[in-house]
């Protein structure tokens, strides 16, 4: 097995797979209320096609796979895909990012199929506000999903909060306190401006430096493992199990440590979340491409990875997060 590296000598070992652009929520920062034009069903990769791409990626050195969307749990039979991925030699870490609404129903089956851990997106602990942000979901469903995931042995369960000025930022201390009282692994994420509204939305950004100050008003944090892997910097309050991660895609991009590729639900391989460059895998897949053909296309995508994303310069991408896979 060769190890994959891009033109800037970054090792690439992580593939994020969007399994659908559909979502059961309409979060205010992610989608307009009416939703977005959906991909045609035929354009979405079948599980067998995803598995073939994953096999090629694993043969090149990808070891970690994350399922995302849209909302991955709205796609029928997702556990079948997890089981297919779990059988691929070389893939030793399978995780998922979910809004948690359907997690209670699927947690045990996902674990049995080979899913190892989940990240749950949760932007408010207040029922009414949560409903307003998501334009749909019930907070209790998500909280029950988190508990079910823990009980099923999906470890660790990380809770991701996108901090939005004037919307939920006053809840930062309450989320942080859950790392003490309930051993939660909480991650605060900077709001990222998307699509053409980018400029207007930047006033909603709360920089990680400010989020951290608000957390440290509760007590001093100490660095915590697992540091050095992924975009989050982890801390904890002394003597507790729960951790607090800070993710700053806007104010302190983590491009130099970027180890990932993204496969969209319609079969495009994106070297960078914020670059609209994509390599089409679906057409070759449907024309009978082999694992070796896929490996060549994956290597092409890796060599096209830009050194840095352009978000800081105010440039946003043309697709919504739910269309790319966040
Ligand atoms: N439906 C799943 C979920 O809710 O986790 C997976 C897809 S969602 C697009 C993935 C993540 O992207 C979520 O944590 C969401 O909060 C985050 N996200 C979407 N738009 C964002 C934005 N403008 N800024 C920061 N995070 C964003």
Image (tube, rainbow, N blue to C red):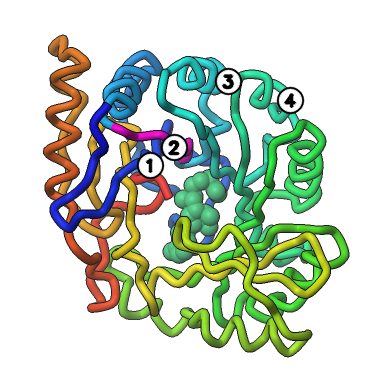
Q: Find the magenta span and give its range.
A: 61-68
Q: Is residue 8 left or right of residue 197?
A: left
The residue indicated by pointer 3 is 79
Question: As drawn, is 122 to the left or to the right of 71?
Answer: right
Residue named by callout 1: 14
Residue for badge 4: 108
Q: Residue furthest top?
A: 288
Query: Of tags 2 and 4, which is closer to the observer?
Result: 2
Q: Is residue 34 magenta?
A: no
Residue 33 visible here: no
Residue found 27% across the figure and 26% down from its top: 1
Residues under numbered marks 1 and 2 in contact, where contact means CB atoms less than 8 Å apart: yes
Q: Position of residue 326 (x, y in %)?
A: 43, 50
Upstream in the sequence, badge 1 or badge 3?
A: 1
> In what element is the residue under mark 4?
helix
Residue at position x 23%, y 71% from top?
A: 315
Residue under the point 47% across and 56% down: 229
Q: Is mark 3 within 8 Å of ligand 1?
A: no
Query: As rendered, which of 313 and 271 lies closer to the eye?
Result: 271
Q: Residue at x 29, y 77 (%)?
A: 312
* Along the line of sight, the residue nearer the viewer: 58 or 112: 58
Q: Residues within 10 Å of mark 3 (few under 14, many from 20)?
A: many
Task: Mark 2 or mark 4: name the one nearer the start of the chain.
Answer: 2
Determine contact: label 4, label 1, CB under 8 Å. Answer: no
């Amino acid at each position: 097995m060769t190890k994959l590296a891009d033109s800037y000598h970054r090792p690439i070992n992580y593939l994020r797979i969007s399994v659908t652009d559909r979502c059961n929520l309409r979060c205010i920062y992610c989608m307009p209320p009416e939703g977005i034009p959906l991909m045609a069903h035929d354009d979405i990769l079948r599980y067998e096609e995803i598995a073939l791409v994953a096999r090629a990626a694993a043969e090149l050195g990808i070891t970690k796979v994350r399922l995302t969307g849209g909302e991955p749990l709205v796609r029928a039979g997702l556990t079948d895909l997890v089981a297919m991925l779990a059988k691929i030699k070389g893939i030793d870490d399978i995780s998922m990012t979910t809004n948690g609404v359907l997690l209670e129903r699927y947690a045990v089956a996902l674990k049995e199929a080979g899913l190892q851990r989940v990240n749950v997106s949760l932007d408010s602990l207040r029922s009414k506000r949560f409903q307003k942000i998501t334009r749909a979901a019930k907070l209790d469903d998500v909280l029950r999903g988190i508990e079910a995931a823990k009980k099923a042995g999906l470890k660790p369960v990380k809770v991701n909060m996108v901090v939005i000025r004037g919307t939920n930022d006053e809840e930062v201390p309450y989320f942080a306190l859950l790392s003490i009282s309930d051993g939660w692994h909480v991650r605060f994420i900077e709001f990222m401006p998307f699509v053409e509204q980018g400029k207007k939305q930047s006033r909603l950004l709360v920089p990680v430096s400010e989020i951290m100050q608000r957390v440290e008003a509760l007590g001093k944090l100490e660095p915590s493992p697992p540091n050095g892997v992924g975009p989050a910097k982890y801390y904890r309050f002394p003597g507790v199990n729960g951790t607090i991660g800070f993710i700053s895609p806007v104010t302190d991009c983590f491009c130099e440590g970027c180890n990932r590729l993204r496969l969209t639900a319609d079969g495009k391989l994106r070297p960078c979340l914020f670059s609209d460059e994509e390599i089409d895998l679906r057409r070759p897949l449907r024309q009978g491409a082999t694992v070796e053909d896929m490996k060549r296309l994956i290597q092409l995508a890796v060599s096209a990875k830009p050194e840095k994303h352009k978000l800081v310069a105010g440039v946003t991408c043309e697709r919504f997060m739910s269309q790319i896979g966040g």
